Image (cartoon, rainbow, N blue to C red):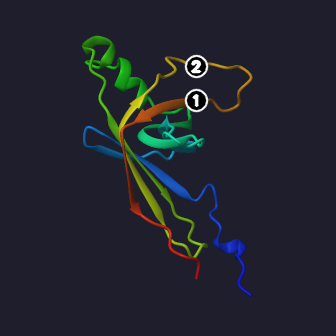
């Protein structure tokens, strides 16, 4: 009888996230948690002579969030750095790449490229006398996604 081995499950902290803004590709080693999801937009449809309400997918919307250690100015710079959105009205889209890569698991690596990323906002400045370590939550939307590498079946 086959069963799932604990070693094949994915460790939630075994992976990396990378950001690419205007060709500057960097590992985001300061990410504490990261998630992105797609919500399908549906319309209802009821056919003549049928009592069942059917649904048709007519679009999708991508959004996500990440919690990062408060130690990078990269995202503040995108919005209110010199020559950026607050002074020019232009907010650059960027790309995020997330990788699950638990070397203990036999399912291998999953890599997802998320494009057309736009931040919903950023903290301008933070202080908290009660916090030993400062972090911040960033929410975003995106318009493209590609599964570059897929998990395989467990060995």
- Residue 30 appears in view: no
* Labels 2 and 1 touching (C-beta < 8 A): yes
The 10 Å Cα crowd at callout 2, few under 14, some 14 to 19, many 20 or more, is: few
- Residue 123 appears in view: yes
Coordinates of residue 142 in the picture (x, y in percent): 40, 37
Q: Residue at x 37, y 24 (%)?
A: 77
* Horizontal relation, residue 115 to residue 103: left or right: left
The 10 Å Cα crowd at callout 1, few under 14, some 14 to 19, many 20 or more, is: some
Residue indicated by mark 2: 126
At mark 2, the secondary structure is loop
* Horizontal relation, residue 13 to residue 36: left or right: right
Coordinates of residue 145 in the picture (x, y in percent): 38, 48
Locate residue 19: give its quadrant: top left
Residue indicated by mark 1: 136
Give the residue at the far bottom of this rendering: 1
User: How far apart are labels 2 and 1 at the CA level?
Assistant: 9 Å
At mark 1, the secondary structure is strand
């Amino acid at each position: 009888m086959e069963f799932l081995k604990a070693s094949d499950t994915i460790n939630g902290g075994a992976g990396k996230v990378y950001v690419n803004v205007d060709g500057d590709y960097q590992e985001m080693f300061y990410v504490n948690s990261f998630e992105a999801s797609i919500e399908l937009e549906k319309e209802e449809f009821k056919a003549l002579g049928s009592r069942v309400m059917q649904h048709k997918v007519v679009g999708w919307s991508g959004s996500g969030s990440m919690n990062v250690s408060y130690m990078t100015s990269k995202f503040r710079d995108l919005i209110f750095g010199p020559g950026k959105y607050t002074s020019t009205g232009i907010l650059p889209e960027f790309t995020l790449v997330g990788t699950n890569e638990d070397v203990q698991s036999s399912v291998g690596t999953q890599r997802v490229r998320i494009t057309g990323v736009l931040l919903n906002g950023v903290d301008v400045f933070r202080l908290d006398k009660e916090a030993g370590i400062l972090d911040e939550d960033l929410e975003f939307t995106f318009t493209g996604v590609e599964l570059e590498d897929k998990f395989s079946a467990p060995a």
